[in-house]
Image (cartoon, rainbow, N blue to C red):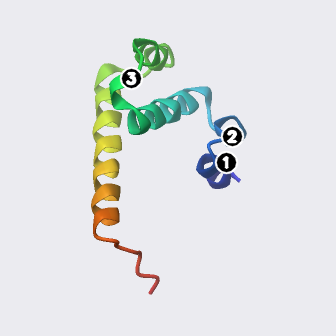
Amino acid sequence: MTVDALCSGALEDAGLSPALTELMRFAEELTRSPEAVPDERITALRAHGYRDEQIAEAVYVVGLFNFYNRVASAFALIPDDR
């Protein structure tokens, strides 16, 4: 259920904590339009207890996954289901 909700973008139905839901919103915004992530999103993460170091780590992780996905798409890589 959690995976299905996350894949469909229904964060409220994923059963995540409010803090993790906010982090997922940040990750989505960072993926879709990194130049437009509002300051309020960072403020909201801090209000949920995330420290700046944790927010920076989230940026790095999101950035790396976006990079990996773009490389896989560029080379038309598909998972090996062995």
Q: Quadrant of the C terminus?
A: bottom left
Whole-percent x and y of residue 64? Answer: 28, 48
Q: Nearer the viewer, residue 11 or 51?
A: 11
Residue under label 2, please give it: 15
Residue under label 1, please give it: 5
Q: Nearer the viewer, residue 42 or 46?
A: 42
Rendered position, 45 above or below 71:
above
SS state under label 2: loop
Q: Are circles 2 and 1 on residues that touch, CB within 8 Å?
A: yes
Label 2 vs label 3, nearer the camera:
3
- State left or right for residue 52 relative to residue 26: left
Residue under label 3, please give it: 36
Label 3 crowd bin: few (<14), some (14–19), many (20+), radius 10 Å: few
Question: Which quadrant of the structure image shows residue 70?
Answer: bottom left
Q: Residue at x 67, y 48 (%)?
A: 5
Q: Amino acid at mark 2?
A: Gly
Q: Residue at x 35, y 35 (%)?
A: 58
Question: Which quadrant of the structure image shows residue 54?
Answer: top left
Label 2 vs label 1, nearer the camera:
1
Whole-percent x and y of residue 33? Answer: 40, 32
Return the disc, 2 or 1, that comes first in the chain's sequence.
1
Whole-percent x and y of residue 8? Answer: 64, 49
